[in-house]
Image (cartoon, rainbow, N blue to C red):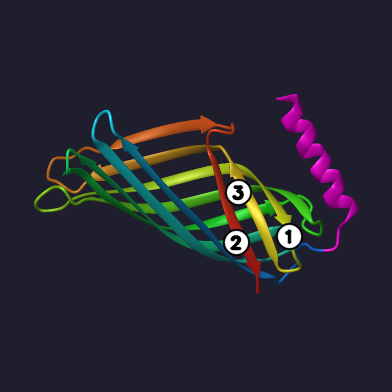
């Protein structure tokens, strides 16, 4: 763990020392993430495929504060012995706010606050089974410019609250709270300054 903090400190010092890129008031950014995973378990004759992507656009209201909107889509398909047992899709739409601690630098740490509306559809049911919900979360992140207008980012962990309810008569819904700031929940993305 000490090595991780030392690495982050060195990157921060390097970023501050080579401050040539960065964000400023009025900048608009286009961001995106992509995730693809596949697991083929030959012992259980099970294949699991996951895909997710999101796009967002944000604007810097001040040098440190950006707000924006995003949409995303994800899918999970599980096949056991050539029979589809899980076929889910997830659509999200939301808004976010960020505070960048050193926006003029090549490297910056930021705080991210997001809220999203979710629609999960289970396509193995007839008719399709739907669950709708809301997700509110906060997370720390890092932004690093690799060129004048292109940066890489990572959001590490989250603290959040979520609620979901099935679209069936009599459903009461479910709520949840989660907290985790560790390397098991890292999201990578790319930002392009317009």
User: Of discs 1 and 3, which sits in the foreground?
Assistant: 1
Residue of label 2: 67
Residue furthest to the left in view is 126
Q: Disc 2 or 3, which lies upstream in sequence?
A: 2
Pointers 1 and 3 in contact (C-beta within 8 Å): no
Residue of label 1: 146
The CA distance from mark 2 to mark 3 is 10 Å
Q: Secondary structure at mark 2?
A: strand
**Residue 41 on image: x %, y %:** 31, 34
**Residue 32 on image: x %, y %:** 53, 61
Q: Is residue 31 above or below residue 116?
A: below
Q: Secondary structure at mark 1?
A: loop
Residue 31 magenta:
no
Residue of label 3: 112
Q: Disc 1 or 2, which lies upstream in sequence?
A: 2
**Residue 117 on image: x %, y %:** 38, 54
Q: Residue at x 76, y 68 (%)?
A: 148
């Amino acid at each position: 763990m000490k090595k991780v903090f030392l690495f982050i400190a060195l990157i921060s010092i390097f970023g501050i020392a080579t401050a040539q890129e960065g964000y400023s008031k009025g900048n608009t950014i286009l961001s995106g993430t992509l995730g693809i995973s596949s697991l083929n378990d030959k012992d259980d004759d099970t294949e699991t495929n996951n895909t997710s992507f999101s796009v967002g656009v944000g604007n810097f209201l001040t040098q440190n504060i950006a707000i924006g909107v995003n949409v995303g889509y994800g899918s999970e398909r599980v096949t056991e012995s050539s029979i589809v047992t899980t076929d889910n899709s997830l659509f999200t739409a939301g808004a976010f706010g960020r505070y960048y601690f050193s926006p003029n630098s090549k490297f910056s740490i930021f705080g991210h606050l997001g809220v999203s509306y979710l629609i999960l559809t289970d396509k193995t049911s007839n008719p399709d089974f739907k669950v709708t919900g809301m997700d509110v979360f906060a997370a720390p992140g890092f932004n690093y410019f690799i060129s004048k207008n292109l940066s890489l980012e990572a959001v590490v962990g989250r603290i959040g609250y979520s609620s979901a309810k099935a679209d069936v008569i009599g459903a009461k819904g479910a709520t949840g709270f989660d907290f985790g700031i560790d390397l098991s929940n890292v999201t990578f993305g790319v930002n392009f300054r317009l």
